[in-house]
Image: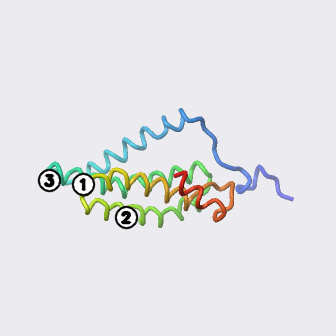
Amino acid sequence: MTNSATNPADIGNRRFNGGLVFLMGLPVRAVCYIAAEGFIPKQVGSGDHDILLANRLGFIYTPAVRLWLGWLQRSWRRALIGAGVDIGIGSGYMILCASRNFIAIMVGFPCLLGGVLAAVLGSNRSPWLSGLGARLGKG
């Protein structure tokens, strides 16, 4: 018989209240923005700047969320699985940015990030396939 305190699968997710999660997210979002801004050449026009910023955020912010979820769920396996999801989300968002359709960019990214990431990497407390549709809608 194994002791649940020593079995990593039995530890469960870390639990924080909403205010603490918001405060933890502020510096992560700020660092992602600063990093994305740093990868943009200084001599681009303002319209191109916004598209390039959105594109870079698609590839920088999703791995940050993935790492945070891995830490929160105490599952680095889920964080590594998320690497493939991140590439897909960033690539999809890059295609949206190439369309230069403001609505697709501003609505598409949250839908891709929230919906797909929630659906694929859902909770480690429930079976993966049985709640897939609900997580997609919730995200």
Q: Residue at x 26, y 57 (%)?
A: 101
The vertical placement of 27 against 131, above or below, is above
Image quadrant holding the N terminus, namely bottom right
Question: Percent position (x, y) of residue 61?
Answer: 40, 52
The quadrant holding residue 111 is: bottom left
Residue 42 vs residue 113, the one in the foreground: 113
Q: Which residue is mark 3?
A: 44
- In the image, what residue type sits under mark 3? Val
- In the image, what residue type sits under mark 2? Gly
How far apart are labels 2 and 3 at the CA level?
23 Å
Kind of element beneath mark 1:
helix
* Circle 1 crowding by C-alpha within 10 Å: few under 14, some 14–19, many from 20: some
Which of discs 2 and 3 lies nearer the camera? The answer is: 2
Q: Residue at x 16, y 48 (%)?
A: 46
* Circle 2 crowding by C-alpha within 10 Å: few under 14, some 14–19, many from 20: some
Q: Which residue is mark 1?
A: 51
Q: Residue at x 13, y 51 (%)?
A: 45
Question: Percent position (x, y) of residue 33?
Answer: 33, 46
Left or right: residue 88 versus residue 126 is: left
Question: Percent position (x, y) of residue 50?
Answer: 23, 50
Residue 116 vs residue 3, the one in the foreground: 116
Q: Are marks 1 and 3 in contact (CB under 8 Å)?
A: no
How far apart are labels 2 and 1 at the CA level?
14 Å
Q: Which mark is residue 73?
A: none
Q: Which residue is mark 2?
A: 92
Residue 44 vs residue 102, the one in the foreground: 102
- In the image, what residue type sits under mark 1? Ile
Kind of element beneath mark 2:
helix
